[in-house]
Amino acid sequence: MFAHLKVAPPDPVFGLAEMFRADSNPAKINLTVGAYQTDDGETPILDSVKRAEELILAKESTKNYLPIDGTSNYAKLVARLIFGDRHPVISDRRYATAHTPGGTGALRISTDFLRQQCNTKTIWVGNPTWANHPQIFAAAGLHVEWFPYLTSDRRQLDFGSILDALGRAGSGDAVLLHTVCHNPTGFDLSHEQWREALAIVKERRLIPIFDFAYQGLGQGLDADAEMIREFLANGQAALICSSFSKNMGLYGERVGALTVVTEDATSTPAALSQVKSIIRTIYSTPPQHGGAIAETILSNEGLRQDWMAELETMRLRIIELRETFVQRLSMRIPDHDFGFIRQQVGMFSFSGLTREQVIRLREEFAIYAVESGRINIAGINSRNLEPLCEAIAKCVEQTASCEV
């Protein structure tokens, strides 16, 4: 019955992580999967998370199912984090939030929702994007229209192409918008560019899906949400896919949310009912423990303040790592300009390395990065920084076609 099956290609990120684990080289370096790491190379459990779990275990009395969309308190706390306390979306009851298995679950539900309820057939996506985006959209039955996100040298945004694509999109088409800490490039739109782009989204009556997986790791919790808040303040509709994987370190707990923002409160109950209908056919109800952690932290003011401090420490450390990485590379390869890496934001960086250079780094130096040249800045530490920069320098200097 299954003799016809063929082996599926490995995931471009997790497949490399599997190769890294199998590598016996003691000096190996992993810059693939986007998980925050300390200087010891560990992905930590935040102290605020540990204390939240202690509170949960002390009072937990059941492992019964959650509601299909999660708890109402979780929904309120997620909305408060995205919009702040007094935003019109909240006061006008224009939102419906469902607890999902990570941001990935939110993305899949959002695209099923658009396909089934809005007859959306096309989604516009910048190239490059997160490697899993096109598979999610295809599985939901959407056609992906690609547009250039970076210039040909991959060192800055191609804002003209972004505006051109939005201007060509048809009414009712969806558009994927990385809100902050763009994955995989690290290049974000400025506030002025966001305003210009979102004005076209509004004019063309496009449906934005905000991929909001890194709130707090760019400019800060409120600053990272500023453009979402501004755009949705006056009756615009959108879908927001958020996650606590990165900003709470809850990677394995799979804690996310889909927030549907409606144009007025009369549509909110129907939107939530349709989201719940989709969830029921996929996983029925969300996992309990991770959501309880996020809910406990966000509802306990002391834990919330401690979490915000831990998040700020992570954010500032990533900024420092990025700066140090550029400095060390510039010292080893002074003829090459690495200034474009300083312009990037968040955990990821398009390093400028070519596919051939990335493969050589893996095969000769046991340094693992995605073949697009994307690296996880948070995977750099005081022990591997110098070996990493030395290997990159050798690779670049000995490659005639180097483009770093």
Image (spheres, rainbow, N blue to C red):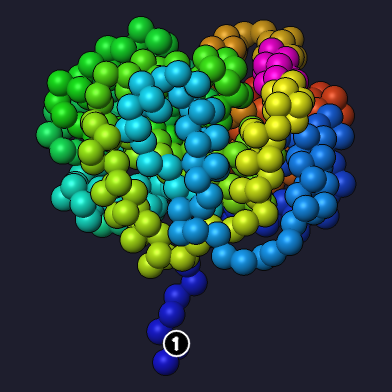
Residue 318 magenta-drawn? yes
Kindly tell me whether residue 295 is visible in this rendering: yes
Mark 1: few/some/many CA within 10 Å (<14, 14-19, 20+): few
Q: Is residue 26 above or below residue 396?
A: below
* Residue lying at 30% horizontally and 46% vertically, measured from the top left: 269
Query: In front: 141, or 69?
Result: 69
**x%, y% of residue 47?**
82, 35
The magenta segment: 312-323
- Reply above or below: 348 against 103: above
Q: Assign the magenta stretch its main secondary structure.
A: helix
Say which of 122 and 111 sits in front. Answer: 111
Residue 242 position within the rendered picture, expressed as x and y whole percent measured from the top left = 49, 38
Q: Which residue position holds label 1? A: 2
Horizontally, residue 372 falls left or right of residue 64, namely left
| Left or right: where 350 falls relative to 49 | left
Was residue 373 drawn as part of the magenta stretch in this picture? Answer: no
**For the image shown, how many numbered marks are present on the structure?**
1
Q: Residue at x 38, y 25 (%)?
A: 91
Residue 32 visible somewhere in the drawing: no
Q: Quadrant of the N terminus?
A: bottom left
Image coordinates of residue 237 in percent, x first then y, are 26, 31
Q: Residue at x 62, y 8 (%)?
A: 335
Query: Three-letter amino acid code at disc 1?
Result: Phe
Locate residue 131, reporting x and y percent: 46, 45
Screen quadrant of the C terminus: top right
* Residue drawn 53% across the image and 49% down it: 71
Report whether 272 appears left or right of 9: left
Local SS, label 1: loop
